[in-house]
Amino acid sequence: MPNNPPVFFFAAANRSDSPLKALARESDLIRRALMEHRHNFYIQIEHEPFITLDRLAYYLTEFSHSIQLFHFSGHAAEDHLILEGTTAKGMQVAETLARLESLQLVFLNGCETEKTARRLLELGVPAVIGTHRPVPDEKAASMARSFYHAMAKGYELDDAFQNAATIVDAGETEEFRGQGMDGAEETPHYFIAYRDEKAKHWVIPTVSYREIIVPGASEIHNFQQSPVNQVLIQVLWEVLKDYSDELEFFHLQHQKGKHVDFRRIRRAITDTLPAPVGEQVRKLFAAEHRIETANIRRFTYERLDQIIRTYNSLVELVAYIMLAQLWDAKMSNRELIVPRYQSSVIRQFFTLSPHELMSYDYIRLIRAIRIIFDENDIPYFIEEIARAKKALYEDEAFIHAYRFMQYMREKQPHVERKLEAGEIESYCVQAEKHLGDIFRQLGFCAKYSFHTVKQINLIRPRHRLPMFRHITVKLDTITAGFLDEENLYQHFLDDNSVILVKEPLNSSKPEFLNLSPFVIDEHALKQKELSRIFYFHYYNFDYQTIYYKLAQMETEKLIIDTGNYPELIQELNDFCYLFFDVDLKHMP
């Protein structure tokens, strides 16, 4: 079995000067139709909503050995495809596609693509769907939905096409996927052509390239010998020892063959991690001694849920760190280049509903921001992200772990009532291992210190340099609890904020990153002692309110409106104006 699943590449070519209203809907309908195949890892979907010639070349090179299906949506006419910013000759595109060794089908969903389609067939592509004449925009979207829905149901290619093609007999609309075309002819819109009879019987693969869920995993790992949490503790101990003197000491003691108390290791691990993440890990560890959460110490749905929450907390934190730095970078350079696709990924995030966020892919958001950083040569505040970017795409253990976690997040609402106890056990065992693999690549967050800055006062004695009195809370060492500290520095930080710091705060001028308004401390806003850290959650467009979720227990929400911490609304509006030229309430 190949290492990677077959790729279905969907390229959309909308144009700013002649937009197709249904193009985004078409992409969404296709993804929905193929959702189960993607979730089961039968196929890998690559989607480029604003395809350019350069991006087309990139995808066809990057996935040259694995693309089985190429779908083009957008403007076309005669023998060329109209891409974003340029026009591509259909014959040249055909010759490039024909060199893809695994290609089974090309679907050209634009106006009058017959010449290009016929050329593809001549060059040896097994099957091609094209158009005889202009296609109404809405009809093209419906055709795509019906076709892929039939394919997803297991129809053979020819049957799926014939089933879907009947939709073109319905009434016409005014917008066409071509330019200057009236679409008045009676010729059928779509046709399909085959290289040979065998091509008619092609079906979408239904064999997973890899077992994401391994049956009997608990037996494979023999958790009677490796108790709950032991795999995770070993990984976190190894990953975090470089950032903790205590963990490094325990590691040296262990290497010398001396006894090490694993309770102290668990405590050191949770105290080394940033507070929002450390709190989630603490729940996995401390549950062994707490009656009210005792189910987490066993192979139960509650444990599986807590592992997924821990993963969520980590990837959300990394995403918000990158969003915060992106804002600073754009403020420093208003000419910063933000590619359209990456911009659309960020914009979409701020429009999601709570239901959509339950399965939202934060790694996708991280990847999008990373591309902006790299294309603009922005140095990463967290330097390790630059080195970890390869893992986001290529590290096999990380990719497998990420896909498992994303699969679980999408299936989680249905897991508890559908799975037997043995299956839950298998999920739990695998989830713990995969969480460890995620921490291997993203555990570097523990290198940096998180602080809440609550208040800053200027102290200016006569004939002496001014000093700044800061009231701060260091957001780690959670087992000892948070503590307000008062210190004098010759520099000043950002007040009422959660900051990420590279050096100690008392260094000459520590480099820091303000995470507000993505990560906030309610007690800093209220000028209260200790800390309550919240993550940005979503914006309610009906009531024009912002919802934050408590980092340690996301069911608890903080609701922000114009009468309650309006500065946070202003900050989010400033971010949206800077990147999208609209405020938050006008984002959809």
Image: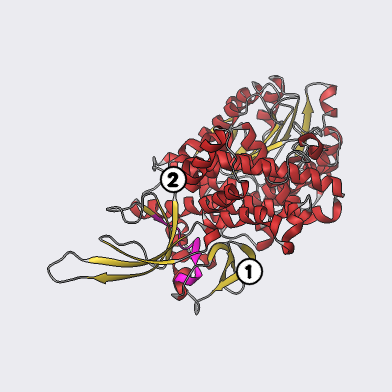
Residue displayed at 85% across by 22% down: 197
The front one of 161 and 255 is 255
Query: What distance separates the C-alpha of mark 2 from that of mark 1?
Result: 29 Å
> Pointer 1: what residue?
556
Residue 335 within the segment the image draws in magenta = no
**Amino acid type, mark 2:** Ile
- Which SS class for mark 1? strand
Q: Earlier in the sequence, mark 2 or mark 1?
A: 2
Quarter of the image that includes the C terminus = bottom right
Residue displayed at 36% across by 63% down: 494
Mark on residue 179? none
The front one of 198 and 348 is 348
150 left or right of 443?
Answer: right
Q: Position of residue 412 (x, y in %)?
A: 75, 53
Residue 520 within the segment the image draws in magenta = yes
Q: Position of residue 530 (x, y in %)?
A: 48, 69
The front one of 476 and 88 is 476
Q: Which residues are magenta?
A: 513-524
269 left or right of 166?
Answer: left
- Residue 161 appears in which quarter of the rendering? top right
> Pointer 2: what residue?
382
Evaluate whether residue 344 shows in this view: no
Q: Position of residue 258 (x, y in %)?
A: 57, 37
Q: In the rendered view, how is the structure colored? A: secondary structure
Evaluate whether residue 210 shows in this view: yes
Mark 1 and mark 2 in contact (Cβ < 8 Å)? no
